[in-house]
Amino acid sequence: MAPKVHGSVFSTATMRAFATLHEKGIEFEVVPINMGAGEHKKEPFICFNPFGQVPAYEDGDLKLFESRAITQYIAHEHHGKGTELVYKDAKKMAIVSVWMEVEAHHFDPVTSKLVFEQVVKPMMMNMETDSAVVEENQKKLGQVLDVYEVRLSKSKYLGGDGFTLADLHHLPTMNYLMGTSTKEVFEARPHVCAWAKDILARPAWIKTVAMQKQA
């Protein structure tokens, strides 16, 4: 039986799960959750995630929530199939884990605020963007990407020479921001810019984005 992903094709967290499944070549079923109607805050979804946040993942009798936990499960469970997004070698995996933590604690908090201000508010909520919040967070993002620029001057990808979850986890918010003025923050750093273009062009990610047009 194919695994099920409960979520929205427009949710950055859900898109992480979709991208991982596409990278591994795993067929899956999407169970749409209408977040505008608040379906993620009530039954039956709340039985999958008591915090009421998408996505949730079903694989047989296994039920998971939290997107980064889901991607790690998929990558480890299907090791040897599709793109190897994790390593069995402890030292190599430790480096990948470091940059996965960096994404979760340094990159995502800033980029999520920028996505909300520059994409969600004007396009989905008919609200004005707060330019002061954008300016503040673009500055913070620049400081984060300065660290990335140094790292990516030494290796093609964040976790080493190969594309891993450390890179994949960045894709959803990055993708949205490439249609905003924040794109310039990425482009101002040559190695970051090259890395971003590389991972955004991956076939698995293109498939993930295409799911929005089909919805």
Image (tube, grey):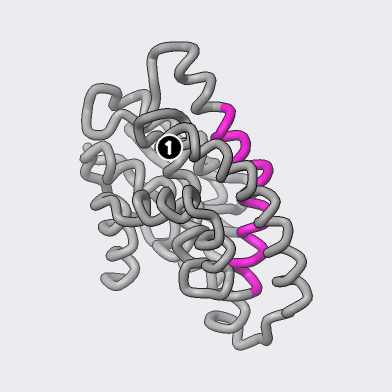
Q: Amino acid at mark 1?
A: Tyr
Question: Quick one: quadrant of the N terminus?
Answer: top left
Name the magenta segment's main secondary structure: helix
State whether residue 213 is above or below residue 19: below
Residue 90 visible, this angle: yes
Q: Which residues are magenta?
A: 98-117
Quarter of the image for the C terminus: give it: bottom left
- From the viewer's perspective, is 49 left or right of 3? right
Q: Position of residue 177 (x, y in %)?
A: 52, 67
Asked if the stretch drawn in magenta spans residue 101, the answer is yes
Q: Position of residue 193 (x, y in %)?
A: 46, 55
Identify the residue under disc 1: 157
Q: Nearer the viewer, residue 155 or 37?
A: 155
Left or right of residue 113, residue 90 in this image = left
* Residue 202 falls left or right of residue 36: left
Q: Quadrant of residue 97?
A: top right
Residue drawn at point x = 47 percent, y = 48 percent = 191
